[in-house]
Image (tube, rainbow, N blue to C red):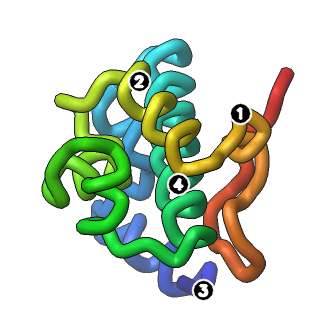
């Protein structure tokens, strides 16, 4: 969105903020969300690198296709433990969460402070 349009919308009362601000997340909660999203992207990247469908990955992980979908979308009902175990089972490594999963990715890499 160009700056002029944004300013006009703000003048009309629109507020622009990210989801974390809207949800009033603490810094710790924001970082946890970022971690979950990075692991989910890495799981999907590992699956795609092996040229597996979600159904094939589900068989490899001994779970269902909907569960693989939940892992790849960082569903809040999926534990980080399960997400990491899935990443490792699909051939991924911890460093995969620190960078975009594939060239042309629009995802921002997780940074280490």
Q: How far apart are marks 3 and 1 (CA)?
A: 38 Å
Q: Which of marks 1 and 4 is in front?
A: 1
Which residue is disc 4 drawn over? 41
Badge 2: few (under 14), some or many (20 or more) residues near its Cα, within 10 Å? Answer: some
Relative depth, front residue between 34 and 47: 47
Q: How far apart are marks 2 and 3 (CA)?
A: 38 Å
> Sequence order check: which comes first, mark 4 or mark 2?
4
Which residue is disc 3 drawn over? 2
User: Which quadrant of the rendered structure holds the N terminus?
Assistant: bottom right
In the picture, measured across the screen, residue 47 lies left or right of residue 60, that is right
Which residue is disc 1 drawn over? 94
Which residue is disc 2 drawn over? 80
In the picture, measured across the screen, residue 37 lies left or right of residue 104, that is left
Q: Is mark 1 on a helix, strand or loop?
A: helix
> Sequence order check: which comes first, mark 2 or mark 1?
2
For the point 54% across and 17% down, the residue is: 27
> Sequence order check: which comes first, mark 2 or mark 3?
3
Q: How far apart are marks 1 and 4 (CA)?
A: 12 Å
């Amino acid at each position: 969105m160009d700056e002029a349009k944004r300013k006009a919308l703000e003048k009309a009362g629109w507020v622009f903020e990210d989801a974390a601000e809207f949800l009033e997340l603490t810094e710790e909660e924001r970082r946890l969300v970022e971690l979950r999203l990075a692991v989910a992207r890495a799981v999907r990247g590992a699956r795609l690198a092996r040229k597996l469908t979600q159904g094939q990955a589900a068989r490899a992980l001994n779970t269902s296709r909907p569960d693989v979908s939940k892992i790849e979308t960082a569903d809040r009902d999926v534990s980080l433990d399960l997400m990491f175990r899935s990443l490792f089972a699909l051939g991924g490594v911890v460093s995969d969460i620190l960078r975009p999963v594939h060239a042309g990715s629009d995802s921002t890499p997780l940074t280490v402070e």
